[in-house]
Image (cartoon, grey):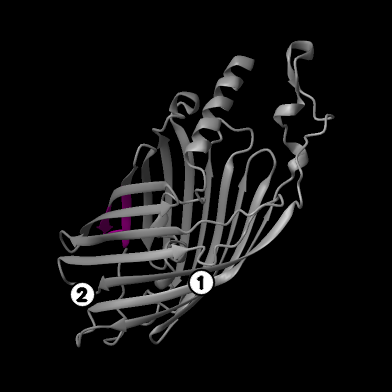
Amino acid sequence: MKKRTFIISILLTCFIGRVSGQDFHLSMYDAAPTFLNPSMTGVFDGDWRIHTHYRTQWKSVNFKPYTTALISFDAPHKNWGFGGQIVNYRAGIGNYNALQGLMSLAYTVPIDGAKKHNISLGAQFGLTQKSVEYQLHSFNNQYTTANGGGFNTGISSGEDFASQSIILPDLNTGAMYYYSGQQSVLNPFIGFSAFNLLRPTESFFVMDNTLPLRMYLHGGTRINITETVYLLPKVLWMKQQEFNELTIAIDAGVYMKSAEMYLLTGVNYRNSDALIFFLGARKSNYIAKIGYDINMSSLAPASTGRGGLEISFTYMKQKPRSKNKKICPKL
Protein backbone atom coordinates (compact mmCIF):
# COMPACT_ATOMS: atom_id res chain seq x y z
CA MET A 1 0.00 0.00 0.00
CA LYS A 2 2.85 2.39 0.89
CA LYS A 3 4.58 1.57 -2.39
CA ARG A 4 1.40 2.24 -4.40
CA THR A 5 0.84 5.55 -2.58
CA PHE A 6 4.45 6.58 -3.24
CA ILE A 7 4.15 5.82 -6.98
CA ILE A 8 0.89 7.79 -7.23
CA SER A 9 2.48 10.74 -5.42
CA ILE A 10 5.42 10.77 -7.83
CA LEU A 11 3.10 10.63 -10.87
CA LEU A 12 0.94 13.42 -9.51
CA THR A 13 4.02 15.56 -8.88
CA CYS A 14 5.22 15.06 -12.43
CA PHE A 15 1.78 15.73 -13.89
CA ILE A 16 1.23 18.89 -11.88
CA GLY A 17 4.69 20.13 -12.83
CA ARG A 18 3.87 19.60 -16.49
CA VAL A 19 0.74 21.74 -16.37
CA SER A 20 2.03 24.43 -14.05
CA GLY A 21 -0.02 27.59 -14.34
CA GLN A 22 -3.13 25.97 -15.81
CA ASP A 23 -6.53 27.19 -14.61
CA PHE A 24 -9.41 24.84 -13.89
CA HIS A 25 -11.39 23.89 -16.98
CA LEU A 26 -14.52 22.03 -18.10
CA SER A 27 -14.80 19.16 -20.59
CA MET A 28 -18.37 20.06 -21.65
CA TYR A 29 -17.11 23.60 -22.05
CA ASP A 30 -19.83 25.06 -24.28
CA ALA A 31 -22.60 23.84 -21.97
CA ALA A 32 -21.56 26.81 -19.80
CA PRO A 33 -21.45 29.64 -22.40
CA THR A 34 -20.44 32.57 -20.16
CA PHE A 35 -17.62 30.43 -18.71
CA LEU A 36 -16.29 29.88 -22.23
CA ASN A 37 -16.70 33.37 -23.66
CA PRO A 38 -18.17 36.57 -22.16
CA SER A 39 -19.49 37.55 -25.60
CA MET A 40 -22.02 34.69 -25.37
CA THR A 41 -23.87 36.48 -22.56
CA GLY A 42 -27.54 36.79 -23.53
CA VAL A 43 -27.01 35.27 -26.97
CA PHE A 44 -30.02 32.96 -27.07
CA ASP A 45 -33.71 33.05 -27.99
CA GLY A 46 -35.45 33.45 -24.64
CA ASP A 47 -36.30 35.74 -21.75
CA TRP A 48 -33.61 34.46 -19.39
CA ARG A 49 -31.37 31.46 -18.77
CA ILE A 50 -29.94 29.79 -15.66
CA HIS A 51 -27.17 27.20 -15.84
CA THR A 52 -25.62 24.91 -13.22
CA HIS A 53 -22.50 22.80 -13.68
CA TYR A 54 -20.51 20.40 -11.51
CA ARG A 55 -17.26 18.55 -12.18
CA THR A 56 -15.19 16.22 -10.01
CA GLN A 57 -11.86 14.71 -11.08
CA TRP A 58 -8.88 12.71 -9.82
CA LYS A 59 -10.96 10.90 -7.19
CA SER A 60 -9.16 7.69 -8.14
CA VAL A 61 -5.72 9.03 -7.18
CA ASN A 62 -6.38 11.79 -4.67
CA PHE A 63 -7.75 11.69 -1.13
CA LYS A 64 -9.72 14.83 -1.93
CA PRO A 65 -10.69 15.18 -5.60
CA TYR A 66 -10.64 18.43 -7.56
CA THR A 67 -14.14 19.90 -7.89
CA THR A 68 -15.68 22.74 -9.89
CA ALA A 69 -19.18 24.05 -9.17
CA LEU A 70 -20.76 26.80 -11.27
CA ILE A 71 -24.03 28.67 -11.47
CA SER A 72 -24.76 31.42 -14.00
CA PHE A 73 -27.66 33.61 -15.04
CA ASP A 74 -28.02 35.73 -18.16
CA ALA A 75 -30.71 37.50 -20.15
CA PRO A 76 -30.98 39.41 -23.45
CA HIS A 77 -32.42 42.89 -23.86
CA LYS A 78 -32.59 44.06 -27.48
CA ASN A 79 -28.99 43.79 -28.72
CA TRP A 80 -27.56 43.64 -25.20
CA GLY A 81 -26.87 40.72 -22.92
CA PHE A 82 -26.54 40.91 -19.13
CA GLY A 83 -25.49 38.18 -16.72
CA GLY A 84 -23.64 36.98 -13.65
CA GLN A 85 -21.65 33.90 -12.73
CA ILE A 86 -20.40 32.30 -9.50
CA VAL A 87 -17.77 29.57 -9.67
CA ASN A 88 -16.14 27.65 -6.83
CA TYR A 89 -12.99 25.57 -7.34
CA ARG A 90 -11.64 23.24 -4.66
CA ALA A 91 -8.57 21.02 -4.77
CA GLY A 92 -6.39 18.83 -2.61
CA ILE A 93 -5.86 17.91 1.00
CA GLY A 94 -5.03 21.51 1.92
CA ASN A 95 -8.52 22.57 0.82
CA TYR A 96 -7.22 25.04 -1.73
CA ASN A 97 -10.31 27.03 -2.69
CA ALA A 98 -11.07 29.72 -5.26
CA LEU A 99 -14.45 31.45 -5.12
CA GLN A 100 -15.14 33.70 -8.09
CA GLY A 101 -18.00 36.13 -8.74
CA LEU A 102 -18.33 37.81 -12.14
CA MET A 103 -20.75 40.15 -13.90
CA SER A 104 -21.07 39.89 -17.70
CA LEU A 105 -22.07 42.32 -20.43
CA ALA A 106 -22.30 41.68 -24.18
CA TYR A 107 -23.48 43.49 -27.31
CA THR A 108 -24.46 41.81 -30.58
CA VAL A 109 -24.16 43.59 -33.94
CA PRO A 110 -25.69 42.20 -37.17
CA ILE A 111 -23.31 42.85 -40.05
CA ASP A 112 -25.72 42.21 -42.92
CA GLY A 113 -29.21 43.40 -43.83
CA ALA A 114 -30.79 39.99 -43.26
CA LYS A 115 -29.25 39.85 -39.77
CA LYS A 116 -27.84 36.37 -40.34
CA HIS A 117 -24.17 37.30 -39.92
CA ASN A 118 -23.56 38.56 -36.38
CA ILE A 119 -20.66 39.67 -34.21
CA SER A 120 -20.96 39.70 -30.43
CA LEU A 121 -18.53 41.50 -28.09
CA GLY A 122 -18.46 40.90 -24.35
CA ALA A 123 -16.67 41.58 -21.08
CA GLN A 124 -16.65 40.20 -17.51
CA PHE A 125 -15.48 41.80 -14.31
CA GLY A 126 -15.49 40.76 -10.68
CA LEU A 127 -13.40 39.30 -7.84
CA THR A 128 -11.80 35.98 -6.92
CA GLN A 129 -11.05 34.97 -3.34
CA LYS A 130 -8.41 32.25 -2.95
CA SER A 131 -7.55 30.43 0.27
CA VAL A 132 -5.58 27.43 1.49
CA GLU A 133 -5.26 25.61 4.83
CA TYR A 134 -1.50 25.18 4.65
CA GLN A 135 -1.41 23.62 8.13
CA LEU A 136 -2.86 20.45 6.57
CA HIS A 137 0.09 20.08 4.19
CA SER A 138 3.36 18.29 4.87
CA PHE A 139 6.74 19.55 3.60
CA ASN A 140 10.08 17.99 2.71
CA ASN A 141 11.88 19.04 5.87
CA GLN A 142 9.12 17.43 7.99
CA TYR A 143 10.01 13.96 6.70
CA THR A 144 11.85 11.73 9.17
CA THR A 145 13.28 8.23 8.81
CA ALA A 146 12.16 7.19 12.30
CA ASN A 147 9.84 4.16 12.53
CA GLY A 148 10.16 3.33 8.87
CA GLY A 149 9.82 6.90 7.63
CA GLY A 150 7.01 9.41 7.58
CA PHE A 151 6.03 13.07 7.96
CA ASN A 152 6.06 14.74 11.37
CA THR A 153 3.86 17.85 11.12
CA GLY A 154 5.06 18.90 14.57
CA ILE A 155 8.32 19.99 12.94
CA SER A 156 8.30 23.55 11.59
CA SER A 157 7.76 23.60 7.83
CA GLY A 158 10.14 26.52 7.39
CA GLU A 159 7.68 28.07 4.92
CA ASP A 160 6.87 31.76 5.30
CA PHE A 161 3.14 32.05 4.55
CA ALA A 162 2.06 35.68 4.50
CA SER A 163 -1.65 34.88 4.34
CA GLN A 164 -4.14 32.05 4.03
CA SER A 165 -6.49 34.12 1.90
CA ILE A 166 -6.10 36.61 -0.94
CA ILE A 167 -8.57 38.58 -3.09
CA LEU A 168 -7.87 39.28 -6.76
CA PRO A 169 -9.63 41.48 -9.35
CA ASP A 170 -10.89 39.81 -12.54
CA LEU A 171 -11.33 41.24 -16.02
CA ASN A 172 -12.12 39.05 -19.03
CA THR A 173 -13.21 39.78 -22.58
CA GLY A 174 -14.31 37.97 -25.72
CA ALA A 175 -15.68 38.22 -29.25
CA MET A 176 -17.63 35.84 -31.43
CA TYR A 177 -18.92 35.61 -35.00
CA TYR A 178 -21.88 33.37 -35.78
CA TYR A 179 -24.21 32.70 -38.70
CA SER A 180 -27.81 32.50 -37.52
CA GLY A 181 -29.63 31.24 -40.62
CA GLN A 182 -31.16 28.27 -38.84
CA GLN A 183 -32.68 26.84 -42.04
CA SER A 184 -29.27 26.68 -43.71
CA VAL A 185 -27.32 23.44 -43.95
CA LEU A 186 -24.34 25.03 -42.18
CA ASN A 187 -24.31 27.40 -39.19
CA PRO A 188 -20.63 28.24 -38.55
CA PHE A 189 -19.27 30.14 -35.56
CA ILE A 190 -15.88 31.19 -34.23
CA GLY A 191 -14.92 32.95 -31.02
CA PHE A 192 -11.98 34.21 -29.02
CA SER A 193 -11.83 34.97 -25.30
CA ALA A 194 -9.09 36.15 -22.93
CA PHE A 195 -9.09 35.87 -19.14
CA ASN A 196 -7.01 37.37 -16.30
CA LEU A 197 -6.40 40.57 -18.29
CA LEU A 198 -5.33 42.51 -15.18
CA ARG A 199 -2.68 39.88 -14.38
CA PRO A 200 -2.90 40.46 -10.62
CA THR A 201 -0.22 39.29 -8.22
CA GLU A 202 -1.32 36.09 -6.50
CA SER A 203 0.75 34.44 -3.80
CA PHE A 204 0.30 33.16 -0.28
CA PHE A 205 3.95 34.11 0.20
CA VAL A 206 5.65 37.50 -0.05
CA MET A 207 6.66 37.17 -3.68
CA ASP A 208 5.88 38.58 -7.13
CA ASN A 209 3.79 35.92 -8.87
CA THR A 210 1.42 37.30 -11.52
CA LEU A 211 -1.60 35.34 -12.69
CA PRO A 212 -0.96 34.44 -16.36
CA LEU A 213 -3.35 35.19 -19.21
CA ARG A 214 -5.63 32.37 -20.32
CA MET A 215 -6.85 32.46 -23.93
CA TYR A 216 -9.46 30.41 -25.79
CA LEU A 217 -10.01 30.07 -29.52
CA HIS A 218 -13.10 28.04 -30.32
CA GLY A 219 -15.09 27.34 -33.45
CA GLY A 220 -17.20 24.89 -35.38
CA THR A 221 -20.34 24.55 -37.42
CA ARG A 222 -23.75 23.02 -36.90
CA ILE A 223 -24.56 20.73 -39.86
CA ASN A 224 -28.28 20.15 -40.35
CA ILE A 225 -28.31 16.66 -41.89
CA THR A 226 -32.12 16.49 -41.94
CA GLU A 227 -34.90 18.36 -40.17
CA THR A 228 -34.47 16.04 -37.17
CA VAL A 229 -30.73 15.22 -37.15
CA TYR A 230 -27.73 17.49 -36.83
CA LEU A 231 -23.98 17.15 -36.28
CA LEU A 232 -21.78 19.72 -34.58
CA PRO A 233 -18.01 19.31 -35.18
CA LYS A 234 -16.05 21.81 -33.10
CA VAL A 235 -12.59 22.61 -31.79
CA LEU A 236 -11.21 24.43 -28.75
CA TRP A 237 -7.64 25.63 -28.29
CA MET A 238 -6.51 26.98 -24.93
CA LYS A 239 -3.19 28.62 -24.09
CA GLN A 240 -1.86 29.73 -20.73
CA GLN A 241 1.83 30.55 -20.58
CA GLU A 242 3.64 27.46 -21.93
CA PHE A 243 0.60 25.21 -21.53
CA ASN A 244 -1.38 24.44 -24.68
CA GLU A 245 -4.54 22.36 -24.84
CA LEU A 246 -6.39 21.26 -27.98
CA THR A 247 -9.84 19.66 -27.84
CA ILE A 248 -11.46 18.20 -30.95
CA ALA A 249 -15.10 17.16 -30.64
CA ILE A 250 -18.24 16.19 -32.46
CA ASP A 251 -21.75 16.43 -31.02
CA ALA A 252 -24.97 15.04 -32.43
CA GLY A 253 -28.66 15.65 -31.84
CA VAL A 254 -31.65 13.57 -32.90
CA TYR A 255 -35.18 14.87 -32.51
CA MET A 256 -37.61 12.29 -31.10
CA LYS A 257 -41.00 13.43 -32.37
CA SER A 258 -43.03 11.15 -30.11
CA ALA A 259 -41.35 12.53 -26.99
CA GLU A 260 -40.95 16.06 -28.38
CA MET A 261 -37.29 16.14 -27.30
CA TYR A 262 -33.75 16.00 -28.65
CA LEU A 263 -31.43 13.19 -27.64
CA LEU A 264 -27.89 14.58 -27.39
CA THR A 265 -24.54 12.82 -27.47
CA GLY A 266 -20.93 13.62 -28.25
CA VAL A 267 -17.29 12.68 -27.97
CA ASN A 268 -14.30 14.95 -27.26
CA TYR A 269 -10.60 14.22 -27.52
CA ARG A 270 -8.29 16.44 -25.45
CA ASN A 271 -4.73 16.12 -26.73
CA SER A 272 -2.64 13.55 -24.80
CA ASP A 273 -4.99 13.90 -21.84
CA ALA A 274 -8.50 12.46 -22.08
CA LEU A 275 -11.31 11.01 -24.17
CA ILE A 276 -14.65 12.44 -23.09
CA PHE A 277 -18.13 11.06 -23.77
CA PHE A 278 -21.44 12.72 -22.93
CA LEU A 279 -25.14 11.96 -23.14
CA GLY A 280 -27.99 14.38 -22.69
CA ALA A 281 -31.45 15.54 -23.63
CA ARG A 282 -33.17 18.76 -24.55
CA LYS A 283 -36.91 19.03 -23.94
CA SER A 284 -38.92 22.24 -23.94
CA ASN A 285 -36.99 24.72 -21.75
CA TYR A 286 -34.58 22.16 -20.25
CA ILE A 287 -31.17 20.83 -21.26
CA ALA A 288 -29.39 18.16 -19.18
CA LYS A 289 -26.02 16.51 -19.89
CA ILE A 290 -23.71 14.06 -18.16
CA GLY A 291 -20.15 13.36 -19.28
CA TYR A 292 -17.14 11.33 -18.24
CA ASP A 293 -13.40 11.71 -18.90
CA ILE A 294 -11.35 8.60 -19.64
CA ASN A 295 -7.83 9.54 -18.61
CA MET A 296 -5.18 9.00 -21.31
CA SER A 297 -2.33 11.05 -19.82
CA SER A 298 0.84 9.87 -18.08
CA LEU A 299 -1.31 9.49 -14.96
CA ALA A 300 -3.38 6.73 -16.59
CA PRO A 301 -1.47 3.81 -14.94
CA ALA A 302 -2.24 5.19 -11.48
CA SER A 303 -5.77 6.32 -12.26
CA THR A 304 -6.60 3.16 -14.26
CA GLY A 305 -8.12 5.51 -16.83
CA ARG A 306 -10.59 7.10 -14.44
CA GLY A 307 -10.71 10.85 -14.96
CA GLY A 308 -13.66 13.11 -14.16
CA LEU A 309 -17.44 13.07 -13.91
CA GLU A 310 -19.28 16.15 -15.14
CA ILE A 311 -22.96 17.12 -15.13
CA SER A 312 -24.77 20.22 -16.39
CA PHE A 313 -28.33 21.50 -16.32
CA THR A 314 -29.80 24.51 -18.12
CA TYR A 315 -33.24 26.08 -17.86
CA MET A 316 -34.17 28.69 -20.44
CA LYS A 317 -37.36 30.71 -20.19
CA GLN A 318 -38.58 30.87 -23.77
CA LYS A 319 -40.11 33.90 -25.44
CA PRO A 320 -43.43 33.60 -27.28
CA ARG A 321 -42.77 32.71 -30.91
CA SER A 322 -42.93 35.63 -33.33
CA LYS A 323 -41.81 36.50 -36.81
CA ASN A 324 -39.28 38.96 -35.37
CA LYS A 325 -37.71 36.61 -32.85
CA LYS A 326 -33.97 36.87 -32.24
CA ILE A 327 -32.20 34.00 -34.00
CA CYS A 328 -29.12 32.77 -32.13
CA PRO A 329 -26.41 30.16 -32.62
CA LYS A 330 -27.22 26.57 -31.65
CA LEU A 331 -23.89 25.60 -30.12
Q: Residue 200's quadrant in the figure?
A: bottom right
State which quarter of the image contains the N terminus: top right
**289 relative to 108, above or below:** above
Left or right position of 100 against 29: right
Where is residue 118? Give x, y as percent: 27, 78
Please give the name of the residue rendered at 44% of the width and 73% of the height, measured from the top-left corner: 41
Query: Could you tell me if the residues under marks 2 and 1 are in contact, i.e. CB atoms within 8 Å?
Result: no
**114 relative to 257, above or below:** below
Identify the residue position indicated by label 2 in the image. 181
Amino acid type of the residue tagged 1 in the rendering: Gln
Q: Is residue 277 visible?
A: yes
- Residue 54 versus residue 58: which sits nearer the camera? 58
Left or right position of 151 against 105: right
**153 relative to 179, above or below:** above
Residue 55's disc number: none
Where is residue 293? Give x, y as percent: 42, 40
Where is residue 68? Give x, y as percent: 56, 51
Is-magenta flag for residue 114?
no
Q: Residue 148's quadrant in the figure?
A: top right
Identify the residue position indicated by label 1 in the image. 124
Where is residue 108? Give x, y as percent: 35, 81
- Residue 195 versus residue 275: which sits nearer the camera? 195
Q: Earlier in the sequence, mark 2 or mark 1?
A: 1
Please give the name of the residue rendered at 21% of the width and 67% of the height, measured from the top-left corner: 187
Amino acid type of the residue tagged 2 in the rendering: Gly
Name the residue furthest top: 148
Q: Which segment did they paint magenta?
A: 251-266
**287 relative to 207, above or below:** below
